[in-house]
Image (cartoon, rainbow, N blue to C red):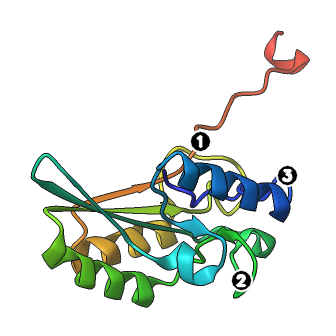
């Protein structure tokens, strides 16, 4: 389960720790988030039916309160050189490497957009260049707001 989202701590750190314990108890592997920054940054390698899949992810958006600290849970804070190093370390161990980044979902005007912004494209290209086979992120399509001026 990818935990790179910026809502990981919406119900507080104690609830986040409870969730992490639940995932462990149920043997649900996680990446991109954890009980501390070391766990959050750790890549995940899953071997299933002869396939070796590597996962890692991070949150580039924030807000800073969402990021894991030395002794606090949260999502992994995105750092391109560090994530590239993790990809290079994971690549020989995995048949496919998945890299996930929660990135800014708005343009310079603060409007939600359905395409990556310039920085996301630079970061995602950097992950591909480091050896990631699949790079995913999050964007929401901007919803059109109707007003009386538009006829409704």
Give how far across and how far down residue 100 sits, in percent: 43, 61
On the question of residue 145 being in view, the answer is: yes
Horizontally, is 34 left or right of 43 in the view?
Answer: right
Q: Nearer the viewer, mark 1 or mark 3?
A: 3
Please tell me which residue is depicted at 57% across the width and 50% down the height of the picture.
25
Q: Separation of disc 3 and disc 2 at Cα?
A: 17 Å
Determine whether label 1 and label 3 are within 8 Å by CB: no
Please tell me which residue is depicted at 85% across the width and 52% down the height of the picture.
11
Give how far across and how far down residue 20 sits, in percent: 64, 58
Q: State the mark number for residue 11.
A: 3
Q: Separation of disc 1 and disc 3 at Cα?
A: 22 Å
Q: State the mark number for residue 26.
A: none
N-terminal label among 1 and 2? 2
The residue indicated by pointer 2 is: 69
Q: Secondary structure at mark 3?
A: loop
Residue 47 falls in image quadrant: bottom left
Compare residues 148 and 106 and report the one nearer the observer.
Answer: 106
Q: State the mark number for residue 140.
A: 1
Horizontally, is 84 left or right of 71 in the view?
Answer: left
Of all residues shown, which one is farthest toward the top? 152
On the question of residue 106 being in view, the answer is: no
N-terminal label among 1 and 3? 3
Q: Residues within 10 Å of mark 1 (few under 14, many from 20)?
A: few
Give how far across and how far down residue 144 sits, in percent: 70, 28
Eyeballing the image, is 134 above or below 69?
above
């Amino acid at each position: 389960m990818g935990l790179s989202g910026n809502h990981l701590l919406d119900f507080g750190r104690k609830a986040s720790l409870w969730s992490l314990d639940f995932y462990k108890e149920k043997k649900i592997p996680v990446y991109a988030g954890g009980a501390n920054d070391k766990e959050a940054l750790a890549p995940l390698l899953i071997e299933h039916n002869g396939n070796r899949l590597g996962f890692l992810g991070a949150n580039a958006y924030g807000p800073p309160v969402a990021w894991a600290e030395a002794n606090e849970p949260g999502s992994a804070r995105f750092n391109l050189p560090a994530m590239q190093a993790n990809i290079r370390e994971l690549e020989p161990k995995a048949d496919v490497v998945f890299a996930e980044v929660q990135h800014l979902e708005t343009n310079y005007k603060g409007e939600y957009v359905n395409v990556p912004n310039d920085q996301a494209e630079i970061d995602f290209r950097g992950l591909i260049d480091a050896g990631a086979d699949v790079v995913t992120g999050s964007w929401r399509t901007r919803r059109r707001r109707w007003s009386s001026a538009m006829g409704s």
